[in-house]
Image: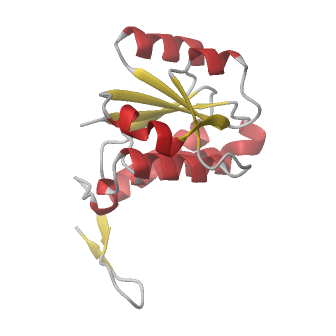
Amino acid sequence: MTRAVILRIGHRPERDQRVTTHVGLAARALGAEGMYLAEVDKGVVQSINDVVTRWGGTFFCRDGVKWRHCINGWKEKGGTVVHLTMYGLNIPDVIDEIRQKDNVLVIVGAEKVPAEIFGLADYNVSVSSQPHSEISSLAVFLDHLFSGTELTARYPEAKIRIIPSNAGKKTEEV
């Protein structure tokens, strides 16, 4: 089974805290194991850890990660690096090949990413080749990577769980 971890680069703490938190939450909900943040932002880490505590799972969030070191270390251990960019290869053309990889590091940029990233990535992947949110790119990519299996995942050690319902909000304490 493929495992995916996110590397968030270009995060500006004074500006991107909410979006980066949502990148982490989408990653967690859609099957990734964790997120490395290439900036120091304890607020993002705390927000994501709070969700993990209440909603379960083993998702990790680490800040202050040096992105070059993270990418090079990942590749040295035989992992695959995927950079999500609107300038990359179309996701339908490469997703089957990427699914065959064991360890996938998914790079999600905030501001303009350094050109070096395009050369370091094993795959530069585009979700639609049109401008849109990095959160939506990540969500579509992970859904394709895991073929929808992540949509019904159960999270160990959850303290709260949603009960599917056509009307109203139903939860249960676990």
Q: Residue at x 72, y 49 (%)?
A: 130
x, y percent for residue 112? 77, 31
Whether residue 109 is visible here, answered yes or no, is no
Q: How is the image coloured?
A: secondary structure
x, y percent for residue 4? 38, 35
Q: Quadrant of the C terminus?
A: bottom left
Q: Is 23 in front, or is 56?
A: 23
x, y percent for residue 88? 63, 34
Name above or below for residue 100 compared with residue 145.
Answer: above
x, y percent for residue 85? 65, 36
Going by the image, does 9 lie left or right of 6? right
Q: Residue at x 43, y 40 (%)?
A: 95
Q: Quadrant of the N terminus?
A: top left
Q: Residue at x 66, y 51 (%)?
A: 18
Whether residue 91 is visible here, answered yes or no, is yes
Q: Hey, which quadrant is residue 96 in on the image? A: top left
Q: Is 151 in front, or is 10?
A: 151
Going by the image, does 65 lie left or right of 142? right
Which residue of the protein is positioned furthest toward the front in this rendering?
93
Q: Hey, which quadrant is residue 107 in on the image? A: top right
